Amino acid sequence: MPGELYERISQDIRFTEGLTACMNCGICTAICPAAEFYDYDPRSIVTTVQSGDEKTLKDLLESETIWYCGQCMSCKTRCPRGNCPGQVIQVLRKVSQETGAFTKSRKGRQQLLIKDTVGKNILKYGYCIYPATAYPEKHPEQGTVWKWVFENSHEVYASVGGNYQGKGPGTLRKIPREALDELHRIFEYTGGINLFNKIEEHSRKKALELGFRKENADPDMEVYTRFVENEQ
Ligand code: SF4
Ligand code: SF4
Protein backbone atom coordinates (compact mmCIF):
# COMPACT_ATOMS: atom_id res chain seq x y z
CA MET A 1 0.00 0.00 0.00
CA PRO A 2 1.41 3.43 -0.95
CA GLY A 3 2.74 5.34 2.03
CA GLU A 4 3.42 8.95 2.94
CA LEU A 5 6.27 9.47 0.49
CA TYR A 6 4.28 8.21 -2.46
CA GLU A 7 1.36 10.42 -1.43
CA ARG A 8 3.67 13.39 -1.31
CA ILE A 9 5.25 12.64 -4.68
CA SER A 10 1.96 11.90 -6.40
CA GLN A 11 0.46 15.23 -5.37
CA ASP A 12 2.93 17.16 -7.47
CA ILE A 13 1.57 18.18 -10.86
CA ARG A 14 4.89 17.24 -12.50
CA PHE A 15 4.29 13.68 -11.35
CA THR A 16 0.71 13.50 -12.64
CA GLU A 17 1.83 14.96 -15.96
CA GLY A 18 5.12 13.07 -16.13
CA LEU A 19 4.07 9.52 -15.33
CA THR A 20 0.93 7.83 -16.52
CA ALA A 21 1.58 4.13 -17.08
CA CYS A 22 5.16 3.07 -17.66
CA MET A 23 5.45 -0.20 -19.56
CA ASN A 24 9.13 -0.71 -18.71
CA CYS A 25 10.33 -0.63 -22.31
CA GLY A 26 13.62 1.10 -21.43
CA ILE A 27 13.61 3.54 -24.36
CA CYS A 28 14.17 6.42 -21.92
CA THR A 29 17.34 4.76 -20.67
CA ALA A 30 18.52 4.07 -24.21
CA ILE A 31 18.22 7.76 -25.15
CA CYS A 32 19.39 9.20 -21.81
CA PRO A 33 22.84 10.88 -22.03
CA ALA A 34 23.34 10.57 -18.25
CA ALA A 35 22.90 6.78 -18.49
CA GLU A 36 25.92 6.71 -20.76
CA PHE A 37 28.21 8.22 -18.13
CA TYR A 38 26.80 7.14 -14.78
CA ASP A 39 25.31 4.12 -13.14
CA TYR A 40 21.94 5.66 -13.89
CA ASP A 41 18.73 4.22 -15.28
CA PRO A 42 15.60 6.39 -15.65
CA ARG A 43 13.52 3.30 -16.46
CA SER A 44 14.20 1.73 -13.08
CA ILE A 45 13.61 5.06 -11.30
CA VAL A 46 10.17 5.29 -12.90
CA THR A 47 9.47 1.66 -12.00
CA THR A 48 10.41 2.33 -8.38
CA VAL A 49 8.16 5.37 -8.20
CA GLN A 50 5.32 3.52 -9.89
CA SER A 51 5.59 0.67 -7.38
CA GLY A 52 4.80 3.09 -4.55
CA ASP A 53 6.93 1.00 -2.18
CA GLU A 54 7.81 3.24 0.74
CA LYS A 55 11.14 1.64 1.63
CA THR A 56 12.45 1.67 -1.97
CA LEU A 57 11.27 5.25 -2.43
CA LYS A 58 13.09 6.31 0.73
CA ASP A 59 16.29 4.65 -0.52
CA LEU A 60 15.90 6.43 -3.85
CA LEU A 61 15.50 9.84 -2.22
CA GLU A 62 18.65 9.23 -0.17
CA SER A 63 20.67 7.93 -3.10
CA GLU A 64 23.20 9.54 -5.45
CA THR A 65 21.03 8.41 -8.40
CA ILE A 66 18.45 11.20 -8.57
CA TRP A 67 21.21 13.83 -8.87
CA TYR A 68 22.71 12.33 -12.03
CA CYS A 69 19.90 13.49 -14.33
CA GLY A 70 20.98 16.40 -16.55
CA GLN A 71 17.37 17.58 -17.09
CA CYS A 72 17.77 17.53 -20.87
CA MET A 73 14.27 16.02 -21.31
CA SER A 74 15.35 13.74 -24.17
CA CYS A 75 13.38 10.99 -22.41
CA LYS A 76 10.12 12.87 -22.92
CA THR A 77 10.58 13.04 -26.67
CA ARG A 78 10.93 9.25 -27.03
CA CYS A 79 8.67 7.65 -24.44
CA PRO A 80 5.89 5.74 -26.25
CA ARG A 81 3.59 6.41 -23.30
CA GLY A 82 4.27 10.16 -23.18
CA ASN A 83 5.96 9.86 -19.78
CA CYS A 84 8.71 12.20 -18.72
CA PRO A 85 11.16 10.57 -16.28
CA GLY A 86 13.11 13.86 -16.11
CA GLN A 87 10.05 15.57 -14.70
CA VAL A 88 9.45 12.76 -12.19
CA ILE A 89 13.05 13.25 -11.07
CA GLN A 90 12.36 16.95 -10.44
CA VAL A 91 9.67 15.87 -7.97
CA LEU A 92 11.96 13.32 -6.30
CA ARG A 93 14.64 16.00 -5.88
CA LYS A 94 12.15 18.40 -4.34
CA VAL A 95 10.88 15.82 -1.85
CA SER A 96 14.48 14.85 -1.07
CA GLN A 97 15.28 18.50 -0.33
CA GLU A 98 12.15 19.02 1.76
CA THR A 99 12.65 15.92 3.89
CA GLY A 100 16.43 16.22 4.25
CA ALA A 101 17.04 12.90 2.47
CA PHE A 102 19.52 14.69 0.18
CA THR A 103 22.04 14.98 3.03
CA LYS A 104 22.53 11.20 2.97
CA SER A 105 24.37 11.20 -0.35
CA ARG A 106 27.45 13.04 -1.47
CA LYS A 107 25.85 14.36 -4.67
CA GLY A 108 22.80 15.33 -2.67
CA ARG A 109 24.89 17.32 -0.20
CA GLN A 110 26.12 19.46 -3.09
CA GLN A 111 22.66 21.06 -3.03
CA LEU A 112 23.91 23.46 -0.38
CA LEU A 113 26.70 24.65 -2.65
CA ILE A 114 24.26 25.08 -5.55
CA LYS A 115 21.87 27.06 -3.37
CA ASP A 116 24.72 29.23 -2.10
CA THR A 117 25.99 29.97 -5.61
CA VAL A 118 23.34 29.61 -8.33
CA GLY A 119 20.42 30.29 -5.95
CA LYS A 120 22.09 33.38 -4.51
CA ASN A 121 23.09 34.69 -7.95
CA ILE A 122 19.51 34.46 -9.21
CA LEU A 123 18.09 36.44 -6.30
CA LYS A 124 20.91 38.96 -6.03
CA TYR A 125 21.79 39.59 -9.68
CA GLY A 126 19.02 37.96 -11.73
CA TYR A 127 21.42 35.48 -13.37
CA CYS A 128 22.17 31.81 -12.58
CA ILE A 129 25.81 32.24 -13.45
CA TYR A 130 27.22 35.69 -12.78
CA PRO A 131 30.78 36.44 -13.91
CA ALA A 132 31.66 38.54 -10.85
CA THR A 133 31.05 35.58 -8.53
CA ALA A 134 32.75 32.91 -10.67
CA TYR A 135 36.07 33.32 -8.85
CA PRO A 136 38.92 31.70 -10.79
CA GLU A 137 40.26 29.86 -7.72
CA LYS A 138 36.85 28.22 -7.28
CA HIS A 139 36.52 27.34 -10.97
CA PRO A 140 39.65 25.57 -12.18
CA GLU A 141 37.50 23.82 -14.81
CA GLN A 142 37.32 27.16 -16.66
CA GLY A 143 40.99 26.93 -17.52
CA THR A 144 43.73 29.52 -17.27
CA VAL A 145 42.08 32.01 -19.65
CA TRP A 146 39.23 32.51 -17.19
CA LYS A 147 41.45 34.43 -14.77
CA TRP A 148 42.22 36.92 -17.52
CA VAL A 149 38.53 37.20 -18.54
CA PHE A 150 37.56 37.64 -14.88
CA GLU A 151 40.07 40.45 -14.38
CA ASN A 152 39.14 42.22 -17.62
CA SER A 153 35.45 41.37 -17.71
CA HIS A 154 34.08 44.78 -18.73
CA GLU A 155 36.40 45.07 -21.73
CA VAL A 156 35.97 41.42 -22.74
CA TYR A 157 32.13 41.46 -22.69
CA ALA A 158 32.00 44.88 -24.38
CA SER A 159 34.18 43.54 -27.20
CA VAL A 160 31.50 40.92 -28.02
CA GLY A 161 28.59 43.36 -27.77
CA GLY A 162 27.67 42.78 -24.11
CA ASN A 163 26.52 45.42 -21.63
CA TYR A 164 28.04 43.92 -18.50
CA GLN A 165 26.58 45.56 -15.38
CA GLY A 166 25.38 48.45 -17.53
CA LYS A 167 22.00 50.19 -17.60
CA GLY A 168 19.51 49.55 -20.40
CA PRO A 169 19.33 46.53 -22.70
CA GLY A 170 22.04 44.06 -23.61
CA THR A 171 23.58 40.80 -22.49
CA LEU A 172 24.67 40.72 -18.83
CA ARG A 173 23.04 44.12 -18.17
CA LYS A 174 22.31 45.15 -14.62
CA ILE A 175 18.87 43.87 -13.66
CA PRO A 176 16.82 46.71 -12.14
CA ARG A 177 15.90 46.62 -8.44
CA GLU A 178 12.13 46.40 -9.16
CA ALA A 179 12.67 43.30 -11.35
CA LEU A 180 14.81 41.65 -8.65
CA ASP A 181 12.13 42.41 -6.04
CA GLU A 182 9.55 40.81 -8.30
CA LEU A 183 11.77 37.77 -8.77
CA HIS A 184 12.09 37.49 -5.00
CA ARG A 185 8.31 37.60 -4.62
CA ILE A 186 7.96 34.83 -7.24
CA PHE A 187 10.40 32.67 -5.28
CA GLU A 188 8.46 33.37 -2.10
CA TYR A 189 5.07 32.68 -3.62
CA THR A 190 6.09 29.49 -5.41
CA GLY A 191 7.93 28.01 -2.42
CA GLY A 192 11.49 28.53 -3.73
CA ILE A 193 12.60 30.51 -0.67
CA ASN A 194 11.08 27.90 1.60
CA LEU A 195 13.01 25.19 -0.23
CA PHE A 196 16.25 27.18 0.14
CA ASN A 197 15.56 27.44 3.87
CA LYS A 198 14.93 23.70 4.09
CA ILE A 199 18.23 22.95 2.33
CA GLU A 200 20.00 25.27 4.76
CA GLU A 201 18.32 23.76 7.81
CA HIS A 202 18.93 20.09 6.86
CA SER A 203 22.50 20.81 5.76
CA ARG A 204 23.28 22.50 9.06
CA LYS A 205 22.03 19.44 10.94
CA LYS A 206 24.18 17.16 8.80
CA ALA A 207 27.27 19.37 9.06
CA LEU A 208 27.10 19.31 12.86
CA GLU A 209 26.53 15.56 12.83
CA LEU A 210 29.53 14.94 10.56
CA GLY A 211 31.66 17.66 12.14
CA PHE A 212 32.75 19.16 8.80
CA ARG A 213 35.81 21.33 9.29
CA LYS A 214 38.09 23.05 6.81
CA GLU A 215 40.78 20.41 7.41
CA ASN A 216 38.52 17.48 6.58
CA ALA A 217 36.29 18.89 3.85
CA ASP A 218 36.91 18.59 0.08
CA PRO A 219 36.34 21.75 -1.99
CA ASP A 220 32.68 21.08 -2.80
CA MET A 221 31.90 20.31 0.85
CA GLU A 222 33.69 23.38 2.19
CA VAL A 223 30.42 25.30 2.41
CA TYR A 224 29.41 22.95 5.23
CA THR A 225 32.25 24.11 7.44
CA ARG A 226 30.53 27.45 8.14
CA PHE A 227 27.95 25.73 10.35
CA VAL A 228 30.57 24.01 12.48
CA GLU A 229 32.66 27.18 12.73
CA ASN A 230 29.61 29.26 13.74
CA GLU A 231 28.98 26.82 16.59
CA GLN A 232 32.42 27.32 18.11
S1 SF4 B 1 10.32 5.09 -22.21
FE1 SF4 B 1 8.45 5.55 -21.09
S2 SF4 B 1 7.33 3.61 -20.99
FE2 SF4 B 1 9.45 3.14 -21.58
S3 SF4 B 1 10.49 2.69 -19.62
FE3 SF4 B 1 10.79 4.86 -20.04
S4 SF4 B 1 9.11 5.91 -18.98
FE4 SF4 B 1 8.56 3.74 -19.14
S1 SF4 C 1 15.97 14.42 -18.46
FE1 SF4 C 1 17.29 13.18 -17.18
S2 SF4 C 1 16.43 11.14 -17.33
FE2 SF4 C 1 15.63 12.29 -19.06
S3 SF4 C 1 17.04 11.90 -20.73
FE3 SF4 C 1 17.73 13.76 -19.75
S4 SF4 C 1 19.26 13.13 -18.26
FE4 SF4 C 1 18.09 11.30 -18.85
Image (cartoon, rainbow, N blue to C red):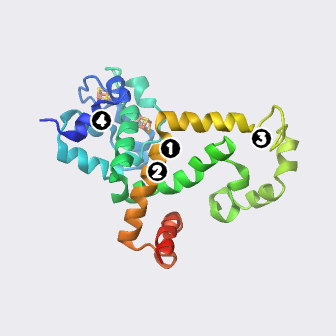
Does 112 sit left or right of 142 as displayed? left
Going by the picture, which residue comes out furthest to the top? 81
Q: Which residue is mark 2?
A: 197
CB contact under 8 Å: marks 1 and 2 = yes
Instruction: Identify residue type, mark 3.
Output: Lys
Q: Which residue is mark 3?
A: 174
Query: Splitting the image into 4 quarters, where does residue 159 fall?
Result: top right
Mark 3 vs 1, N-terminal side: 3
Q: Residue 215: where, in percent of width, then height?
A: 50, 79
Query: Splitting the image into 4 quarters, where does residue 22 fall?
Result: top left
Residue neighbourhood size for the residue with mark 2, other residues' Cα within 10 Å, grouped as few (<14), some (14–19), many (≥20)? some
Q: Which residue is mark 1?
A: 193
Q: How far, Cα to Cα, is label 3 from label 1?
A: 22 Å
Mark 3 vs 4, N-terminal side: 4
Image quadrant, ligand 2: top left
Mark 1 vs 4, N-terminal side: 4
Q: Nearer the viewer, mark 3 or mark 1?
A: 1
Q: Residue 180: where, in percent of width, then height?
A: 67, 38
CB contact under 8 Å: marks 3 and 2 = no
Instruction: Identify residue type, mark 2.
Output: Asn
Residue neighbourhood size for the residue with mark 4, other residues' Cα within 10 Å, grouped as few (<14), some (14–19), many (≥20)? many
Q: How far, Cα to Cα, is label 3 from label 2?
A: 26 Å
Q: Say if disc 2 is inside 8 Å of ligand 2.
A: no
Q: Which residue is mark 4?
A: 9
Q: Height in image: 182 above or below 228?
A: above
